[in-house]
Amino acid sequence: MTVTDAAPAGHVGRVLRRKEDPRLITGRARYVDDISLPGQLWAALVRSPEAHAKIVSIDTSAAAARHGIHAVFTGEDMSDLGGPLPMAWAPPGVEVNNPEHWPLARGSVKHVGDPVAVVIGEDRYAVNDAAEDVIVEYDPLPVIVDPEAAVAGGPFVHGQFETNKVHEWTLSGGDVEAGFAEADVIVERRVVNHRIAGAPIECRGVLADYRAGSLTLYSATQVPHFVRLFMALLLGLGEDRVRVIAPEVGGGFGQKLQVYGEELLACWASRKLGRPIKWIETRSENMSVAHQGRDQISHVRMGAKRDGTITAWHVKILADFGAYNMILTPLIPSLGAFVMGGCYKIPNVQTDITGVFTNKCPTDAIRGAGRPEATQMIEVTLDQLAHELGMDPLEVRRRNFIPKEDFPAAVATGVVYDSGDYHKTLDKLLEHVDVDAFRREQEELRSKGVYRGIGFCTWTEICGLAPSRVTGPAGVGVQAGLWESAMIRVHNTGAVTVYTGTSPHGQGLETAMAQIVADKLGVDPSVVEVVHGDTSLGPEGRDTYGSRSLATGGEAVARATDKVVAKVKSIVAAELEAAAEDIEVSGGKFSVRGSPDKGMALADVAGVAYIGAVPAGMEPGLEETTFYDPENFVFPFGAHACVVDVDAETGKVSVRRYVAVDDCGRPINPMLIDGQIHGGVVHGIGQALYERVHYNDEGQLITGTFVDYALPTAAELPSFETDRTETPSPVNSLGVKGVGEAGTIAASAAVTNAVIDALRPLGVDYINMPLTPMRIWDAIANSQGASPEGGTQP
Amino acid sequence: MSSTVNVRLNVNGTEHELEVEPRLLLVHALRDQLGLTGTHVGCDTSNCGACTIHLDGEPVKSCTVLAVQADGAEVTTIEGLGSEDNLHPMQEAFWANHGLQCGYCTPGMIMSATALLSENPDPSESEVRHALEGNLCRCTGYHNIVKAVLDAAEKTKGVTA
């Protein structure tokens, strides 16, 4: 179901079919692997089967001698790079152990899949044959996989640091010890948020073409502008000589928010060989080397008064970063720390983060990036608190919600939540979910041996990255301002091209942005083309991640359009002999207020701007650019409920019902919002029930393909019920907030709470995800002497 | 270089004679030799279904078929199903119901869904969900895909019968 909206006046707020879809549903879209260039060669990587080893020797002769093979390179051949792969996080006063990380390993390998050589040749299949012929002699080194063991001591992933610790970072507000002293009840948990994969259905891929001093790189990336910057820096090229194109991109989920070694390698090899180089990742490679997410073990403590008022919340996170720091790796848990108080008014909140190296694939941003972990900790602990207080978990939530009068709300973690009305979303949720009726049904079913549970999650998050003054080098330490740009070009005929610095890959931004522009210019969205993902078109940009593309990119588009509108009004005023401030757009025309019959369509105005005579002193043309740097983040929120059945005999969980009420401010296209929620929720359900990246004690990846890594399929899932409340953000003129990560941030906690609710009569009060049949069966079997972790699972 | 063999394929109504390595996967014959890049590859293990096509009317994962095995067969790919000016009802339903986001799984999803309806023109939601079990999507959570397939079934009722 969807909310019934009052019919909006324009295109904004309406369901509009996507402009993107005709090319996608007919097979006419162009993803990286669909593009080929004259003279193109293929690359295949030789990857380490060892989790940790010294490279004794690499014999490339047999591979190089094969027919059609042009070159085989190893790390030593790439000594002319300007530097290692980037880690762009350096907050003031925080020491970060950051090892060099090269596109091809130098001297040693640190995780399974670490690349040691590249084979380049004429054919997709032949290069893979040749890669098999590269003989690498490894001297295995001791392997460390468990982050708790790794932080306690050796063996060390990077011996030079004499520790596996990457960094320590604390964010604290109030005084948690004082808060615990006030508490009547304290709940403690060890919350494991296991490692998951981004798993876009399109793996990564690159096609690099260096010719006559200029480089063009096609890459399946979310961040073409960042990639351009680092390709230029690391290859010693001017940024003007580097063009990065993110063509159609088949999903990202954070995995493609990265500057990857394969991108650099292909560019470097193209320059070296004077030929275009294509590399298309296999799924097995993607599962072992494309960055993964989560992987935190946290010790959490929540203190509350007997009436349910939370007085203190202390979280100690051990974050497993794997073998290297990728572009934002150490920042990820901190993103959760900023909203560690969730949607609750908790005066004393502290998050202590320790990052640790292990011999596994690196972690970095995956959909939600730090915030699903924070929400999981808050929401499962709060449910247990309610249980121990003998209170309704929803009542505990309501008692602690930040009241709507407090907004903008400065919270203990030091950020200011822009807007919120948490009671409203929960009320709306309860219009869909009759909890009393559910409890009666639950009771009845239990008497028949059916264990049904309901779980809730009320949440907020921080997104719309972001104000440069906060995220930049002097703030939390991202070495970039995260403003966004837009350029609007009205053509001679009145057609409009929008250039956005964001780089969408499935979100429907072409449609949403066209709706925004169409209303302001009095045209149909069908004549507004949105161009993205090409660093040579439009201004410098900051790309797509962190649910930012509408709140920053969309707002930039709105502001650039406003500049165009101002010029349009001046032209129309001159033509109609009126004052510019009296010109308004309605019915597809710019006309004098009160005289709607006499007016000019945008095409007429464009005619004047390009072909006729603009007013004296005005430049011709109709094109404007904006760089927008938001004043604050945006903080979407919501209330989700999940109903599950747990088969106590087998441990199998079935999701019967999932209701999501979200508030992402003013909706631009409700259909797109629902779509983002559906997909986000399934990413969260997937983590809660099915998905886990699993390494054995030797650092071998057990879940190396989709055979072993259990992505949810249509058959496991129900249809979803979605609804919204609308609390506009005051941060931007559109009133919008991000929605790309919302579903994922909420869902794993709602599912976990539902499963625990189902199993409480069996003595189970906590289980760590993934809630697989084995774990649940184990938890039930062990429930007589249940540990705080609810059983014997790792 | 391995030896090659000749393969005859009728793809989207056009006869082709290809010279292929015996090990060439059908999906690569379609993509790399015929330039039909609408059929995608998303895994190495026949799990994701992005490469689903119709082979003599049956939905198959073209990454799991050798081109030589398809010798003499009729192949339909997403490009042969409909065009922007003349969409197949399933393509239209995916568009109308927001049954896609990044679009990468979409061609395979549409090919599986059309195969379902030709066998079972009036499926239940559960039947749709189970029929699409072999096609993975990471964007949509399947909600709108299922809705699209049911919508297409509704709209084509009586048309295909």
Image: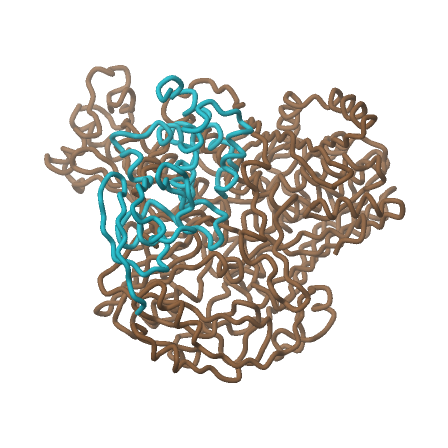
Chain colours: A brown, B cyan
Residue drawn at the location 57% of the way across and 35% of the way down = A419
In which quadrant of the rendered view does residue A131 lie?
bottom left
In the displayed image of the protein, which residue is found farthest to the left? Answer: A612
In which quadrant of the rendered view does residue B107 lie?
top left
Identify whether B160 is placed above or below A317.
above
Residue drawn at the location 74% of the way across and 56% of the way down = A794
Left or right: residue A711 versus residue B50 is: right
Identify whether A262 is placed above or below A770.
below
Q: Nearer the viewer, residue A118 or A611?
A: A118
Left or right: residue A662 versus residue A792 is: left
Q: Where residue B63 sits in the image (x, y, percent)?
A: 41, 51
Q: Where residue B15 sits in the image (x, y, percent)?
A: 22, 44
Q: Is residue A466 visible?
A: no
Q: Nearer the viewer, residue B83 or A573?
A: B83
Left or right: residue B16 versus residue A181 is: left
Identify whether A377 is placed above or below A83.
above
Residue drawn at the location 61% of the way across and 60% of the way down = A702
Residue drawn at the location 25% of the way across and 16% of the way down = A596
**Total labels drawn:** 0
Q: Nearer the viewer, residue A436 or A51?
A: A51
In which quadrant of the rendered view does residue A218 lie?
bottom left
Q: Nearer the viewer, residue A619 or A90?
A: A90
Left or right: residue A29 versus residue A790 is: left
Position of the N terminus of chain A by quadrant: top right
Q: Is residue A347 visible?
A: yes
Identify whether A567 is placed above or below A692.
above
